[in-house]
Amino acid sequence: EAQVTQNPRYLITVTGKKLTVTCSQNMNHEYMSWYRQDPGLGLRQIYYSMNVEVTDKGDVPEGYKVSRKEKRNFPLILESPSPNQTSLYFCASSLLGEADTQYFGPGTRLTVL
Amino acid sequence: GNSVTQMEGPVTLSEEAFLTINCTYTATGYPSLFWYVQYPGEGLQLLLKATKADDKGSNKGFEATYRKETTSFHLEKGSVQVSDSAVYFCALSDRDTNAGKSTFGDGTTLTVKP
């Protein structure tokens, strides 16, 4: 089954404790992206990657890191999480092209205390 | 930069009512436009899309037309069902100078009552 998987689905942590949210897709997509969803703010793009070893900042990259060492994986790293990073996070992937549909993962709900 | 403005919600309709959710955008290039739907507890999934002016995207009875002159992509459905209750997001993808960047609206929550 074609899908985007994220782990963990739920995470409660404390300020300053480094964490990684994994994202993996099995559709051989070149493009992957991370978003956060907050009430009243919709989805905001954190980082995206057009291919292996190519990453770019989205609209809200501060406090996040990403890497793209393999085509299928695109982990999101929070080196020193803070309470304002409490949010619902979505990973997405797509083919590259003129109007490519993004396929979203199920989301990771992160709470930083 | 790019932006997407959606009609504020929440929207509550009775079954079989007509639905319109307004979406307007600003973009520096010539974007592709999308509507995504998010059902409770799930990720987003594509509802429909359009790539050029006057294109009409359609799916499951929903329609939206890419209007370059008014920079709009309003979502419509002639007769909504209870199962259409969800959050709807208008989005654009920049294909030119900022290829790879995606911009989403704030989302509109639709509740359809029987």
Image (cartoon, coloured by chain):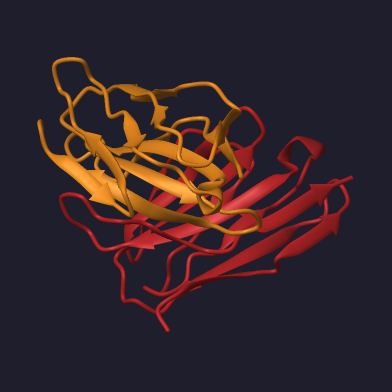
Chain colours: A red, B orange
Q: Which residue lies at the image location 16% right of the left edge and 36% below the top edge? A: B96
Q: Which residue lies at the image location 30% right of the left edge and 56% below the top edge? A: A101
Q: Nearer the viewer, residue B24 or B57?
A: B57
* Outermost top residue: B70
* Residue B98 left/right relative to A108: left
Residue A27 lies in quadrant: bottom left
Q: Is residue A71 visible?
A: yes
Q: Which residue lies at the image location 53% right of the left edge and 21% below the top edge? A: B8
Q: Residue A109: where, in percent of width, then height?
A: 72, 54
Q: Is residue B51 visible?
A: no
* Residue A20 left/right relative to A96: right
Q: Nearer the viewer, residue A76 or B108?
A: B108
| Quadrant of the drawing holding the N terminus of chain A | bottom left
Q: Residue B72: where, in percent of width, then height?
A: 26, 23
Q: Residue B93: where, in percent of width, then height?
A: 29, 40
Q: Nearer the viewer, residue B21 or A70?
A: B21
